[in-house]
Amino acid sequence: MSSFTFEYPFALVLLLLIICIYKCPASVKKIIFPHLNLFTSHTSWLSKEKLFYSFILALLITALSSPISYKQNTSHYKKGRDIVFALDTSGSMAENNKLGVLKDVIRDFISKRFDDNVGVSVFGSYAFSAIPLTYDMQSINFLLDFFDVGIAGDSTAIGDGLYSAIAILDQGDAKRKVIVLVTDGLNNSGSFSIKDVVTIAKNKHILIYTIGIGKSSEFDAELLKKIAKKTRAKSYQSANIEELATIYDELDTLEPSDLPSQHYLNKKMLYIYPLILASFLIGYLVYTANQRREF
């Protein structure tokens, strides 16, 4: 027996826009519904055109929410780790295309992650959670293209970057949680104290591996060593970013833990059906509008 659900049920909240067809003033309708010319000039509250427009909108929103049918919804556990990269994207990462090479290294890294969940925190003058924990490595590979030098400002807020990474890890279920901090500069910005954030990580049993890239005089090597040591991890220094691949073997030695995973069996995408019907009705409205203009 087949079951039914929506992959993006939150999109159904857009159905509230249908109310606007009947209640919003004309000035607002023109912004939300640009093709009001499809209505006759004086339409009643329950006119055929408005009902059609409401039905079309409902069909398009239903398609957007991606309805699916499936035979069985199974949950199982895999063995893995939660790993978050805290990436420095400050202005200095533009030198010698450091950020571009670093993204290539991360792509190579995630290509070898089959059971781990990976996320990304980005920091410069401030920090933000760029990619939440996911085992969808193709999505991470795609999103990395949108990371540019200066995307979070030109300064270096290491404390903020670590705090953001911890927030991402808090959403994970793995017993073994890891932050890989990569920076090429000195801490000179941010709202969070590195000492306080590292203490939070230690209390949560999060390992922080630190990687200083470039010349040792360009970043605080001692600080990175202290961060790693306090969380019982290791610190790396490298003038050549490609050498960072050595951390792979180290992460592989960490004990994996059960991670929940979920998938659908015999899944069938159904969005095409409301989309086709909506297209047919739009075509009908356009046709009737043209007929009115001819007369």
Image: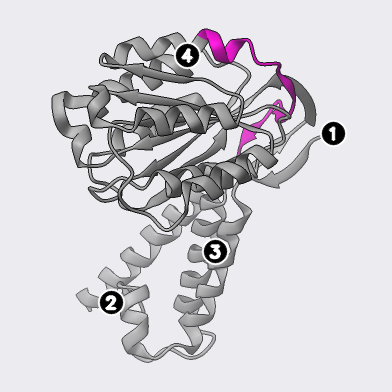
75 up-or-down from 79: above or below: below
Relative depth, front residue between 66 and 50: 66
Helix or strand or loop: what does disc 3 sit on?
helix
Helix or strand or loop: what does disc 1 sit on?
loop
Q: Between marks 1 and 2, how big is the CA–CA gap?
A: 48 Å
Q: Look at mark 3 in the image and give the residue it sits on.
A: 58
Relative depth, front residue between 183 and 48: 183
Please name the residue shown 57% across and 23% down the image: 233
Work out whether mark 1 precedes mark 3 in sequence or the reverse, and give the earlier one.
1
Which numbered disc, 1 or 2, marks the residue closer to the eye? 1
The x, y position of residue 256, in whole percent, is: 70, 18
Query: Does residue 276 appear anywhere in the picture?
Result: no
165 up-or-down from 266: above or below: below
Specify the farthest residue to the right.
1
Work out whether mark 1 precedes mark 2 in sequence or the reverse, and give the earlier one.
1
Residue 247 is marked as: 4
Q: Which residues are magenta?
A: 249-269
Q: Name the image quarter holding the N terminus.
A: top right
Q: Look at mark 1 in the image and give the residue it sits on.
A: 1
The x, y position of residue 235, in whole percent, is: 46, 21
Residue 100 on the magenta span: no
Q: Look at mark 2 in the image and give the residue it sits on.
A: 292
In the picture, measured across the screen, residue 142 lies left or right of residue 255, that is left
Residue 266 on the magenta span: yes
Q: Between marks 3 and 2, how big is the CA–CA gap?
A: 25 Å
How crowded pointer 4 is (Cα within 10 Å; few <14, some 14-19, many 20+) is rated as: some
Specify the farthest residue to the left.
96
Amino acid carrying mark 1 in the image: Met
Work out whether mark 3 precedes mark 2 in sequence or the reverse, and give the earlier one.
3
Disc 3 to disc 2: CB gap under 8 Å: no
136 up-or-down from 114: above or below: below
